[in-house]
Image (tube, rainbow, N blue to C red):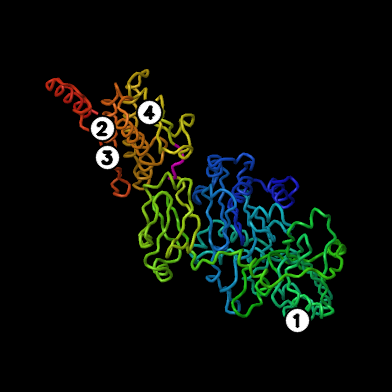
Amino acid sequence: MDKGIKLYRYFEQELTKMGVIKRAWFTTFNLDISFVEKYLLSILTGNFPSDLKIPQDYEIINDKLAASEEDLINDKLEFKVFYDYRALMATGRGKQTTAPLYPIDIKQLNPNETKTFEHGVFHPKVILLEGYDGRFWLMVSSANLTFGGWGKNRECFFLEELKDKENISEVLIFFGKLFSNEKEENEQGMIKSLKRKMQGAKPTASWKFQSSFSVNSFVDSLVQKKPCSNLTVWSPYFAKDLFEILSSHFSEVETIHVVPDQSAAGKIRLTEGNYERCITQKKVIFKQEKLPTELTEALAHAKVWITDDYVAIGSWNMTEAGMNTSNVGGNNIEAGIISRIDSNIKKELTNHLEILHYPICSEAAELQDEKQELLVNFPIVIDLVLNWELLRIELASPTFDELLNSLSLDTSIEVPGLGLKSIHELKYGINCREAIKSLVTNRYYKVVQNDEVCYSGYFREVGFANRPTHRFENLDDLMKGWVNERPEDKQELQRLIYSSEMEGYEMYDNSKQILSGTGSNAWFMSFYAFECISNRISETQKINEPSERKKNLIKIGRVLPGSITELSQHLTELSRVLKGDPSNFKKSPIYLWFLIEKTNVLIQKYNTLIQDENESLNQLENGSLKSYLNINDSKLQNQWEGYIHQLLKEE
């Protein structure tokens, strides 16, 4: 992004004054997850966007994201994004981090009986930040979480420390409505912290947070003094019948200045009939800004409303939906701030305006096409959770019965690494043990009904601590990693699990060496590594708390670099290579058989202690020892076979 970009650079600069951020919640209409992860998450976690070039780089951010409330230590960050479920954009890579996304269906958000939102959109652009020092900040703007919003458009924004009692109350109401129920709302650490902050706060701010959930309407809060001499509005979008809006809701305003966005060619988003009808009212005057040539091509996406005494900055377009004046369920969820405005600042903002004569108007079909391009008309919103602790994909919302009422019986979910799964499997959760490697990097799913996508989104991940991200490059490194019983500490020998796929497994020189037994102390190191793995399993029996004991066993089984699962994968692939090209195993087949048998002994011990069918590991398939020995003398063969089995018993 260009260094001259004001909104992003301003936000970056202000963050440096706030100290370390503990929690960050964002709301948006459009969501470009590529932008959020590369630019916003990077600076919130103390990283540089320029360092994030390949998928592996994003693990730096994942390490900084808190997996739970208890995990919010050592400068970790709780991060949430709430967005309209129909406005998920994909302009770059897919989702690279474990940051949770919350798709919002505003039909579920009816704050009171007088406002309905059935046909509107979730449109607020609000940022709530909590620092580790106990301070809070609120930012409202007109900018969506996209490259255009923060890097190209002309937008408006407001950022202040949040310490006023009334504003804290309004913010609590706003964010509280976004959770599915009161229990989920009250479990949020941000909500709890804000409530404690409100107890000692006083009503001191000169500005007010205003949302669609506020008791007073946006129009009443903005035009408090009636009659009002002037209203100036910057808005890129307008009501189909702007004349009716102005007549009904601003009849006591003497003069209304409307500043529309103009394309480079001078076109505005009003039909000719709408425009002509407005200017028949002498009090309605269309204006434009005197701008340098380089700014005329940028979308003027700002929504600013100025009256005699107040200024409103936020997400309110000059539409029925934006102002929440629709009587037919067409209201949006909106938010922003309304503040007293100094006369000098008001002059600075309005004095450079000039009358807009004879603008180029839009056709009604153009406006309708643009509106439809903003949304994917999904019939349902589905929130799926990828639970790394249980290795299960779970249905968070709607309920399973509601899901079946909305979709046909043959509907499927396309899951990375698993393919199409029947929607009925969501009743108890989809086992994703076989798709771990795919799901580490690919979190995107589709819901398919009658061969058409009826919903798509990203899994919301929980249980990050059990998400396996690192593995050893080869069998040799894995064995070295276990010689001190703590393979997780051998970071110099690890690589990210998805830096190269196991498909097309290459016989690394170190693996060849250890299997042929020609490496220095190779056999001894392998046997010692198995002993260390066995010891680590045994150590878990000293843990008194059953849940903690099980957690530690699961780490050994499938989470740690060098886990029993990873060891099994290495040996399975090497067995496949052996069968395909025996010439690579002139001295090694018997040793490979021995490693598999030793691994099966570990698996048996692990399964006995874990006592959970869902976490039990499968024994590895192994060939007959006689076929590996390849000794013609049957007596000698029996002696060798007996000797090797005796060794295994002693282990």
- Kind of residue at badge 3: Gln
Disc 2 residue crowd, few under 14, some 14–19, many 20+, Cα 10 Å: some
State yes or no: discs 3 and 2 in contact (Cβ < 8 Å).
Answer: no
Residue 569: name its quadrant. Answer: top left
Residue 583: name its quadrant. Answer: top left
> Circle 2 is placed at which residue position?
597
Q: What residue is rendered at 38% in x and 41% in y?
A: 558
Disc 1 residue crowd, few under 14, some 14–19, many 20+, Cα 10 Å: few
Alpha carbon distance from label 1 to label 4: 79 Å
- Kind of residue at badge 4: Met
Judged by depth in the image, the label closer to the viewer, 4 or 3, is 3
> Circle 3 is placed at which residue position?
619
Alpha carbon distance from label 4 to label 2: 16 Å
Q: Which label belongs to residue 572?
A: none
Q: Earlier in the sequence, mark 4 or mark 2?
A: 4
State yes or no: discs 1 and 2 in contact (Cβ < 8 Å).
Answer: no
> Circle 1 is placed at which residue position?
247
Q: Secondary structure at mark 3?
A: loop
Q: What residue is rendered at 83% in x and 73% in y?
A: 285
The front one of 576 and 166 is 576
> Circle 4 is placed at which residue position?
479
